[in-house]
Image (tube, rainbow, N blue to C red):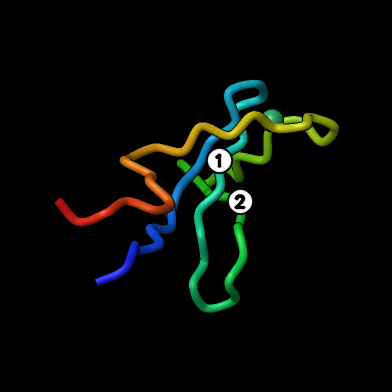
Amino acid sequence: MGPQLRRPTHRSCELCGRVERWDDDVATWRVATEDGEKQVGKPFCIHEWDINGRFAPFKEPA
Ligand SMILES: [Zn+2]
């Protein structure tokens, strides 16, 4: 078994609060909606993404 690519499915910006979810159907990030409001953050933010979970791009099996 080679290294597995583990793709994050959720990320949030530490600077503006934008939240995005990965959409497998279109293979792109989409703005998440929480409580009926799109979590778009600030339009000109450069976005400092905080990937939640244990995102390890090349994690070897233990
Ligand atoms: Zn941002």
Q: Quadrant of residue 61?
A: bottom left
Q: Residue at x 60, y 58 (%)?
A: 29
Considering depth in this image, is 43 or 11 the residue closer to the camera? 11
Q: Quadrant of residue 49?
A: top right
Vertical placement of residue 6 versus 35, above or below: below
Q: Quick one: label 2, few (<14), some, or many (20+) residues within 10 Å? A: some
Q: Residue furthest left?
A: 62
Q: Secondary structure at mark 2?
A: strand
Considering depth in this image, is 55 or 30 the residue closer to the camera? 55
Spatial separation of the CA atoms under disc 1 and disc 2: 6 Å
Kindly identify which residue carries mark 2.
31
Tag of residue 40 = none
Q: Residue at x 50, y 42 (%)?
A: 11
Dots 1 and 2: beta carbons under 8 Å?
A: yes
Q: Quadrant of residue 44?
A: top right
Give amino acid for label 1.
Val
Give amino acid for label 2.
Val
Q: Is residue 62 left or right of residue 49?
A: left
Q: Is residue 50 left or right of residue 46?
A: left
Q: Position of residue 1 (x, y in %)?
A: 24, 72
Q: Is residue 46 left or right of residue 18?
A: right
Kindly identify which residue carries mark 1.
19
Q: Quick one: label 1, few (<14), some, or many (20+) residues within 10 Å? A: many
Vertical placement of residue 18 versus 8, above or below: above
Q: Position of residue 28 (x, y in %)?
A: 62, 65
Vertical placement of residue 30 versus 26, above or below: above
Badge 1 or badge 2: first in the primary sequence: 1
Q: Residue furthest front?
A: 2
Point out the quarter of the image occupied by ligand 1.
top right
Q: Residue at x 31, y 41 (%)?
A: 54
Considering depth in this image, is 34 or 43 the residue closer to the camera? 43
